[in-house]
Amino acid sequence: MTGLAVLIAPDCYGDSLTAVQAAGAIADGWRQARGEDRLTLAPQSDGGPGFVDVLASRLGGLRTATVSGPLDTRVTAQWVLHGQTAYIECAQACGLTLLGGPPTVHTAVAAHSGGVGELIAAAVHAGARRVVVGLGGSSCTDGGRGLVQALGGLEAGRARLAGVELIAASDVEHPLLGAMGAAAVFGPQKGADPATVELLEARLTAWAAELGDDIADQPGAGAAGGIGAALLALGGRREPGAAVIAEHTDLAADVARADLIITGEGRFDDQSLHGKVVSALAGGARERGTPVLVLAGQVTLSPAALAPAGITAAYSITDFAGSVQRAMDDAEVQLTGLSRRTAGDWPGHNSGIAPEQGTVE
């Protein structure tokens, strides 16, 4: 059999491309230069925006529900039911993109997570015995109070979820409160000025007292504006989002079959090597000696950092496009072009020869 078995497994590229779109763009470019290769598309997610999109592309079972948005306007949210496992994405119900404009001080205070609770209720009503909630991209810092209220309160919520395995899928390990907590770290990204951060912190502190059992101190309690804390208080547990996707889409089998792995994300930097999609893929590939290419919006890591992390080479869409603006405005076309050029430069069929380690463009 000619050609390489190529696994294409990118994360999303910020707001420019979903993981599904990115996988398609990379595949299109690669085929144009190396039509003999056998491509497997396996878009990934760490639990943030695109979590449901990625799972639906592999598992099917896409459903929709009309729920409360972050500012009470009703929104249509998608979720996945696969067997008795439901996959929910908090950004579908309380994401920044649902604010109707840029985040402000007003939205930072007013946004809530009620719609996420409504999605959990819909999943349980549909027969789910395991509910996996992807955390990330939220506009709220309510500690998950809205979610809990939508389930009827803490005690009612716990009773409603009795016998249901509840998983918070997130790579965020921040606690709920303090200098590394939800308000201080993520509040400014959601429109909060310093005074509003203080207000949100005080509100979360009062809520933490209601949650009890030192929930606020647990790793991941601060994820998605504190939705992590609510899920933990309801009896859930946290799992890394990238690992959840890997397990539930059988990524290990895809990696085992691959001669080459291509991944990517919006910004390939030091954080990418710690619990993100790229690091998870590189770790599995390194054990097998499989080369890994990263096609990212921007690359800030030094060449010396790549080989120890199991990365063969990393290439930048920004450098290929000639500017950050063009890379963002024309992301799909530019990523396709970068993939085509990278494929054209890659060694011939099953040669086993990789480009020089640590090459960064």
Image: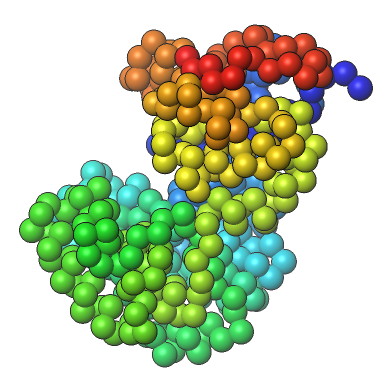
- Asked if 318 appears above or below 160 in the picture, the reply is above
Q: Which residue lies at the image location 55% right of the left edge and 32% below the top edge?
A: 308
Residue drawn at x 15%, y 71% as measured from the top left: 202
Quadrant in the picture for the N terminus: top right
Where's residue 281, x and y in %?
Answer: 62, 40
User: Taking 161 as reference, is 137 above or below it?
Assistant: above
Q: Residue furthest left?
A: 195
Residue 224 in the image, given as x and y percentages of width and height: 36, 59
Residue in view at x 45 percent, y 84 percent: 157
Q: Nearer the viewer, residue 231 or 52?
A: 231
| Residue 72 visible in the shown view | no
Left or right: where 55 falls relative to 269:
right
- Residue at the (87%, 18%) spot, across then down: 2
Most extreme residue toward the right, as rendered? 1
Looking at the image, residue 56 sits to the left or right of residue 93; the answer is: right
Q: Would you say residue 250 is visible in this rendering?
A: yes
Judged left or right of residue 18, residue 289 is right
Q: Quadrant of residue 116?
A: bottom left
Q: Position of residue 272 (x, y in %)?
A: 46, 39
Give the mark count: 0
Measuring from the top left, give residue 95's x and y in whole percent: 37, 53
The type of colouring in the image is: rainbow
Looking at the image, residue 198 lies above or below residue 47: below
**Closest to the observer: 20 or 248?**
248
Q: Nearer the viewer, residue 74 or 167?
A: 167
